Amino acid sequence: MAKRILTGLKPTGQQLHLGNYFGAVRPFIELQKTEQDSEFFLFLANMHGFTQTHNPDELRANTMTIAKLYMACGVDLQRTLIYNPALIPAHAQLNWVLTCLTIMGTMERMHSYKDALAKGKAGEIGVGTFCYPILMAADILLYDADIIPVGKDQKQHVEYARDIAQKFNATYGETFKLPEPFIQPQVATIIGIDGRKMSKSYNNYIGLLDNADILLKKVKQIPTDTKTVEEPKNPDECNVYQIVKHLINAEEDHILREKYLAGGLSYKYAKEYLYEKLSAFLLPLQERFAEISDDEVRKLLQEHSEKVNAIATRKIEEIYQKIGFYL
């Protein structure tokens, strides 16, 4: 039976980073190769982005960049609907319905809220940030998505979407499918250049659009231990290896691990190797990105958003009928 696979990324900052790519974009692309009969939905989470920037020019530019990066990364445009939820009223409509069915305690237990709380005072956290998982649930449930490729940090949000869907179904009758998170264990969390999870908020990311100079500077900043060249090293404890392992094949990975364990590998060599692999991966992507025009993106988004809007409108009408909004 055909499945519906859906994911999206928030356009914050000027670009995507390796964590975004390996956590959500590449799994989505790989599923396109294995799930031949499935439908693919890819959205620009600019409504989520509005929780972090209220500058319209910045939000437009960020959204355009994310759309181009989706295309440059190799998403199959013949099999994927790439769309802008802001053009689809049903996202905001379902968001309100789910908000009314969700208690505050549920949102207080969300990692997104706890992360925001750790960075500032509770009274300074925006309501949009607090309710972020509810909008994400609406993004998912509106399309009866089966599989949601996400990073490990988003798993809890997909679980909330399942829970609220079950609650709605129990109250109003079978309406929503129960989505499943799709997390590749080997890329559940991508390490940043400081050893923490790669994140724009930590400013420890390697961006897909970083030029050669920025890339080299970031690679040089990666901390290493004080072991000498001759000493054997555990690759699993090396921040450099934790990044490069996502850029190499199984044979290359085996050879590199052997070099770490045997001794004789310098961290200078490890960083040069990482820079080489990053450059080989990013340069072709950046060249494809540069070839995509703004008009091409606008045309694609308009066409795809209209198709998706028809699906979303039918779903919200079913929901409104069941909950009593229609007389």
Image (cartoon, rainbow, N blue to C red):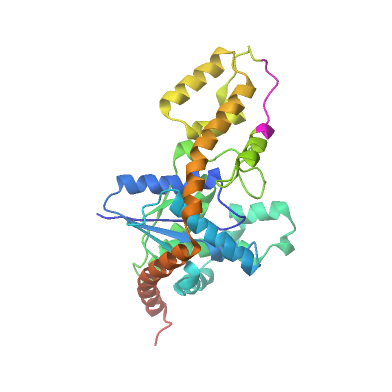
183 in the magenta segment: no
- The quarter in which the C terminus is drawn is bottom left
The one of 304 and 200 positioned closer to us in this rendering: 304
Q: Please, is residue 317 above or below residue 250 in the view?
A: below
Judged by its main secondary structure, the magenta piece is loop
Q: Going by the picture, which residue comes out furthest to the left?
A: 1
x and y percent of residue 42 in the render? Answer: 43, 58
Taking the image as shown, residue 309 lies to the left or right of residue 112, namely left
Residue 16 position (above or below residue 314): above
Please state the horizontal and vertical placement of residue 62, each as a whole percent of the image. Answer: 58, 60
Residue 167's x, y, as percent? Answer: 43, 64
Closest to the observer, 105 or 120: 120
Residue displayed at 46% across by 63% down: 297
Decide if residue 110 is in sight here. Answer: yes
Q: Specify the quadrant that holds the N terminus.
A: bottom left
Q: Which residue does the image show at 65% across and 42% down from the upper left? A: 204
Residue 46 image-quadrant placement? bottom right
Q: How many marks?
A: 0
Q: Tell me residue 207's x, y (percent).
A: 58, 45
Q: Quadrant of residue 309?
A: bottom left
- Of 274 and 185, nearer the camera is 274
Q: Residue furthest bottom?
A: 327
Q: Is residue 131 visible?
A: no
Q: Is residue 226 magenta?
A: yes
* Residue in the foreground of this view, choosing between 273 and 142: 273
Picture layout, residue 57 above or below residue 226: below
Whether residue 90 is situated above or below residue 227 in the rendered picture: below
Magenta stretch, residue numbers: 220-228
